[in-house]
Amino acid sequence: MSANTTTGRPLRITVWNEGVHEAQHDPASMAVNYPDGIHGAIAQGLAEHFPDAAIRTAVLADEEHGLTEEVLADTNVLLWWGHRAHAEVDDAVVDRVQRHVLAGMGLLVLHSAHFSKIFIRLLGTTCSLLWRNEGERELVWNVDPTHPIAQGIESPIIIPEQEMYGEYFDIPAPDELVFISSFEGGEIFRSGITFTRGRGRIFYFSPGDQEYPVYHQKQIRQVLANGVAWASQPEVRRESPTVQHPEREWFAR
Amino acid sequence: MSANTTTGRPLRITVWNEGVHEAQHDPASMAVNYPDGIHGAIAQGLAEHFPDAAIRTAVLADEEHGLTEEVLADTNVLLWWGHRAHAEVDDAVVDRVQRHVLAGMGLLVLHSAHFSKIFIRLLGTTCSLLWRNEGERELVWNVDPTHPIAQGIESPIIIPEQEMYGEYFDIPAPDELVFISSFEGGEIFRSGITFTRGRGRIFYFSPGDQEYPVYHQKQIRQVLANGVAWASQPEVRRESPTVQHPEREWFAR
Amino acid sequence: MSANTTTGRPLRITVWNEGVHEAQHDPASMAVNYPDGIHGAIAQGLAEHFPDAAIRTAVLADEEHGLTEEVLADTNVLLWWGHRAHAEVDDAVVDRVQRHVLAGMGLLVLHSAHFSKIFIRLLGTTCSLLWRNEGERELVWNVDPTHPIAQGIESPIIIPEQEMYGEYFDIPAPDELVFISSFEGGEIFRSGITFTRGRGRIFYFSPGDQEYPVYHQKQIRQVLANGVAWASQPEVRRESPTVQHPEREWFAR
Amino acid sequence: MSANTTTGRPLRITVWNEGVHEAQHDPASMAVNYPDGIHGAIAQGLAEHFPDAAIRTAVLADEEHGLTEEVLADTNVLLWWGHRAHAEVDDAVVDRVQRHVLAGMGLLVLHSAHFSKIFIRLLGTTCSLLWRNEGERELVWNVDPTHPIAQGIESPIIIPEQEMYGEYFDIPAPDELVFISSFEGGEIFRSGITFTRGRGRIFYFSPGDQEYPVYHQKQIRQVLANGVAWASQPEVRRESPTVQHPEREWFAR
């Protein structure tokens, strides 16, 4: 897969994970499902699709959470996974990530990161939802079949066991609704949605949890790769919109 | 419930049904579930919510299908139910209904009327979908809790037995997505959606079928009443947008 | 005009203004155009449309900026005007206003308040734009003629002299685009736009400036009154969406 | 420019023009501005951007208007220009074009083709607007700067002389609003808008008229090339959505 670039530079991807389930060996199944961490599994899946990409990972425990100005400036698309430690993410890092998104960096927000500071900051709402963790089957249905993020995806994707996320999901009306999930217990969820904020593209995708090996599924990896390709804008100069104060008829000069 | 009117005139509602299941006594359960026809049950439900409204019904077998220029000019909101006889609806009547919708008449399109000529005409797509009739439980989830059509509605509405409608539903991206349904078999469906076309407001609501007594459920009747109140624009002059050819600075005179 | 309420309680409106131009007597024309302050003129216009409403005003210099928990709990719709002192608004008050909006309070954001903390907080973007203050004629065109906020409005509204606001306006794609303005110098601006966030409705309307008597124009006052009626949801309990953790089949009990 | 394809086949583009102004030599300026016809100028501009593409033209006078099943099946993106002869376009050809769009063919609708049968068919509204032909300057402003159709475009594009198209433009709310134009006389117009219908992508772009050499402007040609690249989906099998009638749990087999 090419990432829609004409710059010739390899795609630069950063996979961020708080890394707390990994550090705490909790749940115990982490050792089986995610021996290299959730970020490791995600990075591995992306590497299958983008063999030429420069893929790095970063975690909460890294200095500045591994998200320095230099790293973000060198990132086309950032993926964000968090669950237990949202509150521990430094506001200065959140400011920095927001600034880069508004200036053109792509952002994939995954599963329990619906409650991350960066997602709430960019959307403005509580991002609350229904949840229940009983290993229910999730079906991920495609409702926008020609969307770039849905290419090569069979509908539905079947996830044998998953945490249930249900509506009402308190988000702004998404720019595009790509996937809707149903769960064995009958709940539904807008599970694949896009937002544009400033110059940046954001894709939220809910499947993926510390207790289940979701990020090893082929179709889930395809969705994430599609999301990265869609959110990546290598030709767009990293530049935030700013106030302008032009004279009359400036454009005619 | 008031219908948001300042005109003082009672709300005028027309419930249209092809009336074919009724005429054919097929399914046999029609005699039990819909002794006054599907249109009769819908009209009865609306009368509970709008005791002062002028509610009429009309069927395919009526002259001009009961939808003369006079009737439409005297209708704030038209409800449309059809299934077996879409092809028998006269194109001249479809033209007339489309003209009135674009000029400000509200339209509620119900269940199998996703395949009606008028819905396809207004949306431009095939309006095709998945279906299976095995009496599955449908759950109707509200994803826009402050929408006028969702007022007073518990989420989910539980319909014990229903025909399954599933995605992909080939429609334009709706202006507003109010309800998403799940079915026992795992499928999901965008079951309550709005579109504005010209000056007219359109609400499609999928629950309701000839085999099940859905239109007798209290919450379903509330949704239809909310839909009628939302689609009704008694203050809007019935007037289609037209081409204008103004002089320069016409507005300053 | 009624405010779409069935509660029987009068509508409660709070008009907030930083009040800095007033305190500084700058520009000098304030004494002529806004002897009672910009908030005074706005409140006066609303009182013409809602004679029964309880309308209060509040300014930055008031304790807690006049926006205590009690005041917000007793406010259906808050109007916000600010320009010079955005940075002086207490973050704790911004938190409180955001919480009330997400829980169902309406918010009208006016003119230079595009740069207010509360607007940026709710939208997540920089809200930057083009500007030039040379007293150019602004034409406000209606592109959604049956929207409730456009009722009774002639298109275009002619504002003889105004500050120019131009695109690119860095906002999320609005839920609804109601007005687009053009200016003598040729720039255009999305000048009337709606957003829903949580349970709250937000209307941004750009006309209105400290240098020009815009808030005395009849049609501008009509737009603000329409905006208040649209954003007001007196039947909605003031309650923020929250996380729920239900058992399986909870809805069937 | 590549057209986002991995198929290796050259992009196939068909430029359709009614060709009536050309045949009637009216206006006389056609001989100067469009010696090869409007379709010729558009095709020439596209050839500059897609040197490897297979670009054909077709006109009303051709058999089946040059739009046979074979031609459409071999077309990734169709461009449509018409003005005087909308009514002479055969309904059977309109049916065919609509079927191909819903099945995945891209469609660019240009200028006065807002009144073409195919555009009205796909949108469902009257598509009426304001117009005045006095050679006013049009400024085309970009309000979605990272949209693929806006890449490489300066904002505003300046068109020295153009026919004015103004609001209200009676269309459904577009999926994406990319450009808004202002005119010397003060009117504004949603001049670059996208719609997805079925599997097909549609871009309407209003600049371009028989009286002015608009299709020779470099930036206009860039917009059309961007539109073609965006609307082209060479990987999508040409297949209309259809009704499916699956068994329970079909997806699990």
Image: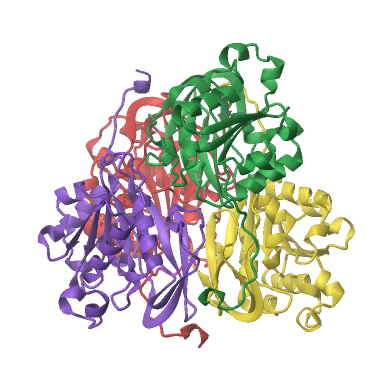
Chain colours: A red, B green, C purple, D yellow
Give x and y (percent) for residue A142: 54, 39
Q: Nearer the viewer, residue A134 or C71?
A: C71
Q: Residue furthest right?
A: D63
Give x and y (percent) for residue B205: 53, 34
Q: Nearer the viewer, residue D207 or D170?
A: D170
Segment tinted magenta in the rendering: A234-238
Image-quadrant location for residue B83? top right
Image-quadrant location for residue C209? bottom left
Q: Residue furthest front?
A: B8
Q: Nearer the viewer, residue D62 or C139?
A: C139
The answer to whether residue C102 is above or below residue D67 is above
Q: Residue at x 60, y 15 (%)?
A: B35
Q: Residue furthest bottom?
A: A253
Q: Residue furthest left?
A: C63
Q: Residue at x 41, y 66 (%)?
A: C219
The answer to whether residue A96 is above or below residue B197 is below
Left or right, B224 with reference to A89: right
Is residue A24 among what the camera can see? yes
Give x and y (percent) for residue A179: 49, 40
Image-quadrant location for residue B246? bottom right
Q: Quadrant of the N terminus of chain B?
A: top left
Is residue D252 among what the camera can see? no
Q: Residue at x 61, y 46 (%)?
A: B101
Give x and y (percent) for residue D27: 79, 79
- Helix, strand or loop: magenta stretch: loop
